Structure formats: structure tokens, C-alpha cells
Amino acid sequence: MRFDIITLFPELFAPLLSQGITRRAYESGLVAVHFWNPRDHADGQYRRVDDRSFGGGPGMVMLAEPLFRCLQAIRAERQEPTPAPLVLFSPTGQTLNHIAVAHWSASAGAVLLCGRYEGVDQRFIDQHVDQQISLGDFVLSGGEIAAMALLDAVARLQPGVLNDEGSHQLDSFNPALDGLLDCPHYTRPEVWQGHAVPAELMSGHHAHIERWRREQSLSLTALHRPELIEQARRNGRLSQQDEAFLRQRHGQRAQDLGEPGTPTVPKKL
């Protein structure tokens, strides 16, 4: 798998590639990363890669020609019968999610364009960009952070990168499991600042532990991302036991909130 990254700031990626668990993916060659600076393909003494926007307005726009020459150089080096897709990180793109990451992790890679300033000349986008990706409804100073997020997410799914081969199978949002949020996790000491680890995790009863974790996952997802519960339900990922727990949880929350028509039980003082 190979990713070619078009960026004005390749040095920003150094910590990602040399530190942490995912560095194994890059050191072993499972994920090859090559950097290309548009300035190396620009004209003039100052290697200019941006200019003012036609029609006025604040900010600068990345020039199409240096990007085009840079892309040509990448295509020539990759020498692929089917050109790798060119991906631009942009607010207009589809939001990156687990399904998209899993797709990229099984691909041959891509060319990643990290925009800067006010954006990229639309003519280059129209003619050469195959896909646009967004991290969410906010704006970054450039596409480098978004590219790092994609690289990190893809790298950790490669075989042998994580210490525990099955670790990523329990990740939040994994549709192969159920697409729900992961449960809370605890480690030593057993009591920290007066707060103990939940008794279920200390019981040694594996079935009880798994059920506790499942119910915690259901509770967290229902509270913070209820749409994921509905999606799991539509996909047949919820058991009868799951549904019974969710009904009980909903009834308890309604009672605690004192919703209209819900009988309340006075608390003992």
C-alpha cells in the first residue's frame, strides 16, 4: 500500500511516521508514504504556489499548474496501469468514518492532496480530484492533519501493527461487530481516589463481564449516539436481550427524569 502526499509542509508528518504503535506499519513497508512538495514544481525564483482569488476577497488560492506538474511526477513514479485516486481534504467532502477507513486499508493506496490557504483552484479539482474527504464540520488550516488522521486509521488496521491482533475488531463504529460505541475500560489500581473498578469486572465470571460490557456499550451509544442504535437495529445486530435492556434503560431514564405520564417512586431519605 502506497500513499503519496502532496503538501507544502512534509516535516509535519515526521512524528507520525517515527513514533507510536503505527510506526510499525511504515517501518515494515506495509504502508509506504512518499512526500511531494508543489514548490519543487513551481516557476520563478520564489517558487510561488499561490495567488490572489479572482473576484477579490481575503486569502490566497493554490495554483493549478504546480499541482498538475507535481501530480504528473507522482503518476510517472508510480507507473500504475490504473492511476491511484487523487484525494483532496476539503469541507465539501464526505465525512471520514470507519467504513471508509476499512475501504482504504484494503486498497493499494492513493494520492493525498493537502490544501492550504483559501483552497485549490477549482479547475484542478474538476479535472483531477477523484474524491474529497472531510473530518467534520469545521475548518483546519490545511489538509495535513486530515491526512495524518487517515494514515493513522489505515495503518492500525494492517496485520501485525497492533500488539493484539483482535484489538481493532472491538473498536467503536466497527460495522463488522455492531457499529456501537465501545464500553468503558479500567486498569490498576482497583481503587483510585476513592473510586473503585466496577464489581462486574472483578468477578472473574466471563459471561457476566461480557454482558456488563455489552450493556455499557448500549447505554453509552443510546445516550450519545442514538442513531447508531437504530442503525444496529435495522442491521439485525441487536439481540432480544439487548432490546430488553434498552427498554428497561429507557423506562428507568424516563422515571428518573419524571417525564409526564411516568409514575415516579419517592426516594428514601
Image (cartoon, rainbow, N blue to C red):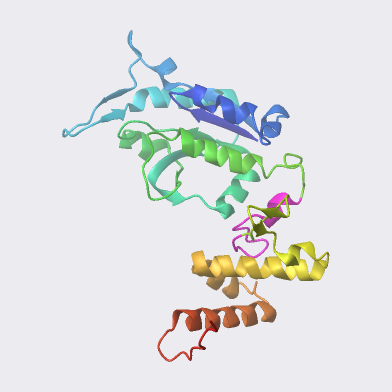
Q: Residue at x 69, y 80 (%)?
A: 241
Q: Residue 152: x, y in percent?
A: 59, 39
How many marks can you see? 0
Q: Residue 126: image x %, image y %?
A: 36, 40
- Residue 171 in sight: yes
Confirm whether the magenta stretch covers residue 179.
Answer: yes
Q: Is residue 194 magenta?
A: no
Residue visible at 44% across and 83% down?
258
- Tell me if residue 107 can be seen: no
Q: Nearer the viewer, residue 107 or 202?
A: 202
Residue displayed at 29% across by 30% down: 61
Quarter holding the N terminus is top right
Q: Is residue 70 above or below residue 100?
A: above
- Highlighted magenta segment, given as a residue range: 166-181
State the residue lying farthest toward the front: 269
Q: Position of residue 196 (x, y in %)?
A: 68, 59
Taking depth in this image into account, of 167 and 194 the one nearest to the observer is: 194
Helix, strand or loop for the magenta stretch, by majority: loop
The x and y percentages for residue 204 are: 83, 64
